[in-house]
Image: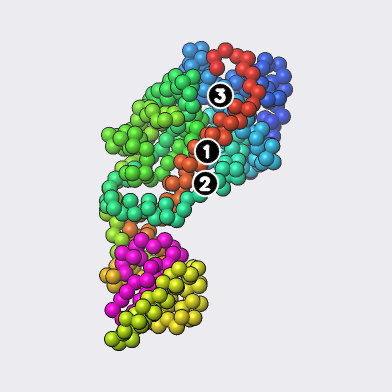
Amino acid sequence: MAGAALAAILCLTAIQAPSAQTVEAIAAVVNDEAISTYDLDGRLKLALAVTNLPPTEENRRRLLPRVLRSLIDERLQLQEARRLNIAVSDEEIQAAIATIERQNNMPPGGLQEFLRANGVGFATMADQVRANIAWSKIVRRQIRPQVEVGEDEIDEYLERLRSRGGGTEYIVSEIFLAADGPAEEQTAIQTARDLVGQVRQGTPFPALAGQFSQSPTAAVGGDLGAVREGQLDSRLEEALRSMQPGQVSDPIRVDNGFYILQLRDRRQVDAPSPADTEIALRRIFLQLPPNPSEEEVETQENLARTVSETVAGCEDMETLGAEVGAAQPIDVGRLKVGELPADLRDTVRSLAVGEASRPIRLADGFVVVMVCARDESNTGLPDREEVLRLIGGPRIEMLARRYLRDLRRIAYVDVRVAGR
């Protein structure tokens, strides 16, 4: 029933809004579409309500450049979505609204009541949510496939965490405000200072992140999740080290803008034990006869080298093992690294999943091993999917900002109100 009511509201506001816009002046033109002063006024009211600022002319003047920039960007995003035949359904908007309510501890329908109490039309929020969803779809389709993170990068990342031993883990939320050039820097820092002030006066951080942040985490109230020392920009980590749980940082300048961080929690993580990593292992063992001659040793070593260089994945281990007459079972099953013989542990730890080892000389032969699965959940380390996100996320974010910057560069934008 609630979902149907919300859908009805969305449809109603979509019909009513244009009639109100027809009597308003034009605030800006983006390619062939107008942003009316009705649109701008509604978004300013929303920004003032979310930041809990009094609706004075001074506050409206200070927020107007950032709000107008957001409206222009959203119009560009929606135009690009149409060009790519990307649509956003009412059901997706309903789900996003429900998420916003949960993040801000509102009951179902609470956001609509909040907007009504502050004189903000529901269409204003729905339009913003629609643009955010459309842009996230564009990023997934156009940018994410361009970002490749190799297995070797994941291995190196995990090895760095292992070598650091235990450390501090931060539970963090973020707001990012882009400043792509000197002209935007003053507006961005002033907005950042305003947002910090509002959070410290009690405005919920997720509400501000959802309204103002230009990071993809805006869609989840700025929730960056758990990050460890060494995973963030050193300037952000320096700020986190001096903060206590519940605190919000001052604006932090980075190369392309400003961050505001909220430290939700901090905890110590014990040093992971590589011996506790559970693996699925396969091996091809080429046995030597008792008291082998140099020729027999060389023959088996060359055969082992051929296996190492030609085997293509775990399934191929079974086939190739049978072809070369491997002794003992090929599929060893699941076991912990610490259960392996000492002369195999370091080799196995350094292997990527599906990578064959070099030939390893044992007392009675040569062995080639391959890790077919690795579970590090009990070592305190992030899993490989999480590492993929941690490495790939900043790359995707950088390319997304570049994509939007290119859309701005080629667009026709005519701003007709003062204060841009």
Q: Nearer the viewer, residue 158 or 358?
A: 358
State whether residue 326 is above or below residue 247.
below
Is-magenta flag for residue 92? Answer: no
**Rounded to the nearest whole Å, what is the CA distance between mark 1 and mark 3?**
19 Å
Q: Disc 2 designates what residue?
A: 147
Q: Which residues are magenta?
A: 344-370
Please report contact status of discs 2 and 1: CB closer than 8 Å, yes or no.
yes
**Rounded to the nearest whole Å, what is the CA distance between mark 2 and mark 1?**
9 Å
In what quadrant of the picture does the N terminus appear? top right
Residue 128 in view here: no
Q: Disc 3 designates what residue?
A: 69
Please report contact status of discs 1 and 3: CB closer than 8 Å, yes or no.
no
Q: Quadrant of residue 263?
A: top left
- Image position, residue 32 (x, y; %): 71, 25
**Rounded to the nearest whole Å, what is the CA distance between mark 2 and mark 3?**
28 Å
**Residue at (34% x, 80% y) in the render:** 297
State whether residue 298 is above or below residue 48.
below
Disc number lying in front (1 or 3): 1
**Residue at (42% x, 81% y) in the render:** 326
Q: Nearer the viewer, residue 117 or 179?
A: 179
* 360 on left or right of 55: left
Q: Considering only order in the chain, which callout, 3 or 2, is on the residue closer to the N terminus?
A: 3
Q: Which residue type does callout 1 highlight?
A: Leu
Q: Extreme bottom residue here? A: 290
Q: Considering only order in the chain, which callout, 3 or 1, is on the residue closer to the N terminus?
A: 3
**Residue at (60% x, 43% y) in the render:** 142
Q: Extreme front residue here? A: 295
Q: Which residue type does callout 2 highlight?
A: Val
Q: Which residue type does callout 3 highlight?
A: Arg
- Image position, residue 83 (x, y; %): 69, 37
Q: Disc 1 designates what residue?
A: 399
**Residue at (42% x, 55% y) in the render:** 152
